[in-house]
Structure formats: structure tokens, C-alpha cells
Image (cartoon, helix red, strand yellow):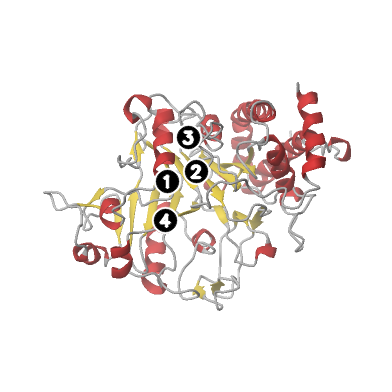
Amino acid sequence: MLKRITAILLLCFLCVSALPGAFAAPCEQAPDRCTAVYVGKAVCAEGTMLIGRCEDADEAVLNKLFFVRQALADSGGEMVDTGAEQKGFSVEIPEQTLKYTCLRDSSALGDGPYDACCMNEAGLVVMGTVSTKVGKEYSRIDPLKGQGDGLREAILPSLLACQARSAHEAVHLLGRYVDRYGSAECNTLLFSDPQEAWIFEIYGGTTYAAMRLPEAQMAVFGNGIMLGWADPDATDGWFFSGRLRGCLEQLTKAVQDDQGRYHLARSIDPGPRAEKNNMRTWRGQQLFAPSSAGEYSDDVFYPLLFTPEKKVSVLEIMQLFGDRYEGTAYDMRLPGNEGRRPIGFDRQVETHIVQTFPDLPDYTCHLQWLAMGNAEHAVFVPAFSGITDTFEKYRVDDDGDGIIHDSFYYVCKSIFAVASADRDFLSRGVREFNRRQEERMLEEILGSLPDVRAACARSEEEGMHFVTLLAMRFYSDAQVQMYNLNGRGGNTDRIVFEMPD
């Protein structure tokens, strides 16, 4: 079966790659970027907290890179937004910074680093962002900063990961940055550490709200303001901009209850909710809590949090990020659904899921599962946050020609380009092949935890060395499998990494 799929993929790839624009997405809507997921540890099958996000983009081919940014003793005291149109906008940071992993944009794009999904040595994960918008009235009350005059997604994750040591600290630090510099975009971020997770929503140039996420619920959401009932003066499990209440009071149709609480989302972005966002939120609930989700309706405001009907595995979240409403009336394969916006969007750049093991040392307590290209047809490969380096094929940068044939990103993207053209056979085969690999890797990761703990107990240096070798072995195996699937197996030798005793 695999040989047949590989042969067909190779034949199709040779035909498709010869065409200009072969990797451009078909006629789906321009993206509202990204879908995010949270699973509390009490409802996770592995007993681990999960946060995840797929990164979507306007670019059909982006060449995302996976790096480790080393700690700096002399940072220069500032972080510059290097986007070509940002006029050198910079913010103050400490001279001494923390080590962190990141998913960086190719330098050829010229719009800044976009260091998505940062895991730092202090045990903090910064996941961002999910782009959002607000209603016209609210945007007049709290307008965004102009181009080059405020904070953007391009630097937000790295700005926090280089210095914050906990999710709670990241929340307060981002609030201070918005207070001081203002925001040029509406964005939602997720923060997690070994103890807790927070969601942070930016509503305008000066206002925001953050909430600690509960351990016994989960969330799946698209591009929209999601926080519901809140008292802007609350402090337990909440954090608000000092200007938020005043802005809410200026709204002509703010949604308020008899306790004086505001429904933040319905007040700030009264709707109606766009189907391309609302349906993704419904789909998460329909998959994991079907008896309460009901049939989809544009008129229903689907809440951020819900309780799944059974415990949710990280493997199921991997499948979720490639979901295209299969088995519903909105199945993207059915006539008339071509213009819908699924979670498994054609312009996905990469997808990351972070699984937290709180009994490991902070510097390596997080495990990132990374799928390059499209989650629908790429394998999720694991790496602990304590790694000191990443696989070379994750670091092949764009020299300006657009497509880098030797990068792991490109290989995964090319498989998607062909498999997505035949979802009745090729797509099904590739997804099943990848699913089996992911099941095997999860089993190996869980089985390796005693060895990880033992290495960490000997010393931090040994712990980092061990998890780096472990990651390299998974990278190498995944490379062989993906290159074989791509028809390039003959050009790739398996790299052998010996694990210490």
C-alpha cells in the first residue's frame, strides 16, 4: 500500500512541481489566520495539559523554520520589529535573555521574525497568535496604533519568551507592554507553564483581557474574540487593562447582566459571527462534545470553553488540525462547500501542539509536536523544550527564490500539494501512514520518560544532551519517512544517533 501511494505521489509530484504556482492553494477564502486549541490536564487522556495552534498565512509557500535561540548576556536592550514597513519600531527588553525554541518565518518574506510557539528554559510556553477583529464602534473607541507605531504578532511571542518565567508573569508583562507601546493589531495568545495556562486577548490600541484556563475543560476556536462574562474589576483568575471598563461603558449596546458583568465578546464584537470562524469553534465541540454541540447555526454564539464527553488524546488533537468537516453536511469534498473555511486550511504553514509534563525540570518540561506544512498530510514530530539544537532540514532558509527543495517544510508541503488533489485515495493513505507513525512516537516518548528523568537527575547538561539526541532520532526517522513518501528516499540516508546508556 505504501509503495503504491509513494509511486503515485512521485509521478504526480513530478507533474505538479513543473507547473508555475503548483503550491498555490485552491479557491478557498483568504485566511483569517489560525485556529487554537486548549485541553486541560484533567480531561487529557495522557494527563498532560495541551495547547496548540495551526499557523495559516496568505503565502502558499512560506518555508517556516524551527530554531533554538540561545540566551544572551548582552541583548542590546531592545527588540526591533524588522518588518520592512515598521520604521524600525523597537521595544525595551532586558540585557540578559533566556534561551527558547521558536518557529521562525523565512527571512525572504521581509516582514519580521514571527517566532511562533516559543518554549523557554524557565518552563514558559508562548503561543501566538490568533488574529482577531473587533466591531466598528469599539475600534473607534480604542483605535489600533498605526503601522510602525505599535506591537505586532511579528515580535510578541519572542518578546515574552526571552524574559518571562511563568504564564502569570507573561500575562502581566504583555499588559505592561501594551500599556506602554500600544498595539497595532488585535491578537489572541496562549501562555502555559507546568502549573497553569492563560488566554490573553488584545482588543485595541490600549485594551486587553486575560483569563486563567480551567483544568477540567477544553477549547477550540478560530479567529474571533472569545472571552465571555467578566467583571473588569475581578482579580482572581483574571487580568484586565485599566482602560477596559471605560471603553465598555462607552459602547451603545454593551451586553451586561444584572451582576454588572460584561459579556466581552458580544460587547466588543457584537457580530453576527462570521461562519468561517464560528464553524471552526462549533466543529471542536461537535467532535468532542457532540451531544451538547447540536447542529451548526450562524445564530449560535459558541462559547470558548466546553467539557469533552471523554478524555482527549494528543493524537486526536493532531487529527483535529487536519479536519475538513468530514462526515458532516459541510464536508469540504461535497459540491457547494468549496468556499468554506475548515480547520485544515490549505494555506497552513505549520501546526504545533505543546504537551506539558510537570514532573520534569522546568527547562525541559514541555514537549512540542510539530507538523510542517499542512497538518492534514504532515507527520507531527516531537521535541522536548530542553533541546540545544534542531535538525538541519528545519533550518534551511529561503535565499529569495521562493521554494527551497531541500527543506523539511518543502517536502511536507509538496506531499500535501499532491495528496490533497486526491482525497479519496492518496489523502486517506497518507493520513493513515502518518497516524501510525505518530502513535509509535507517542508510545516511545511515554516509554522514554524514566530515562529523561534519570538524565535530568544527573545534571542539567546531561538532561539537555539526552533530549536533544532523542529529538534528533525522531527528526531523522521522520525525514526518511517523508522523503520516501515524496519519492526522494534514494537520496536520503538515515542518520543514526546513539543514545547514552
Of callouts 2 and 4, which one flags the residue occurring earlier in the amino acid sequence? 4
Say which mark, if any, is on residue 48: 3
120 on left or right of 41: right
Q: Nearer the viewer, mark 3 or mark 2?
A: 2
Say which mark, if any, is on residue 341: 2
Q: Nearer the viewer, residue 155 or 333?
A: 333
Provide the residue designation for mark 1.
277
Which residue is drawn at the image coordinates 23% and 57% (left, top)?
232
Which residue is drawn at the image coordinates 72% and 38% (left, top)?
418
Q: Amino acid at mark 4?
A: Thr
Of callouts 4 and 1, which one flags the residue occurring earlier in the amino acid sequence? 4
Q: Nearer the viewer, residue 291 or 29?
A: 29
Q: Amino acid at mark 2?
A: Arg
Q: Nearer the viewer, mark 3 or mark 4?
A: 4
Q: Mark 2 to mark 4: distance in Å?
A: 15 Å
Q: Are marks 4 and 1 in contact (CB under 8 Å)?
A: no
Residue 391 visible from this viewpoint:
no
Residue 258 visible from this viewpoint:
yes
Q: Residue furthest front?
A: 336
Q: Are marks 2 and 1 in contact (CB under 8 Å)?
A: yes
Q: Nearer the viewer, mark 2 or mark 4?
A: 2
Q: Residues within 10 Å of mark 1 (few under 14, many from 20)?
A: many
Q: Mark 3 to mark 2: distance in Å?
A: 30 Å
Q: Amino acid at mark 1?
A: Asn
Kindly state the secondary structure of the residue where label 2 is placed: loop
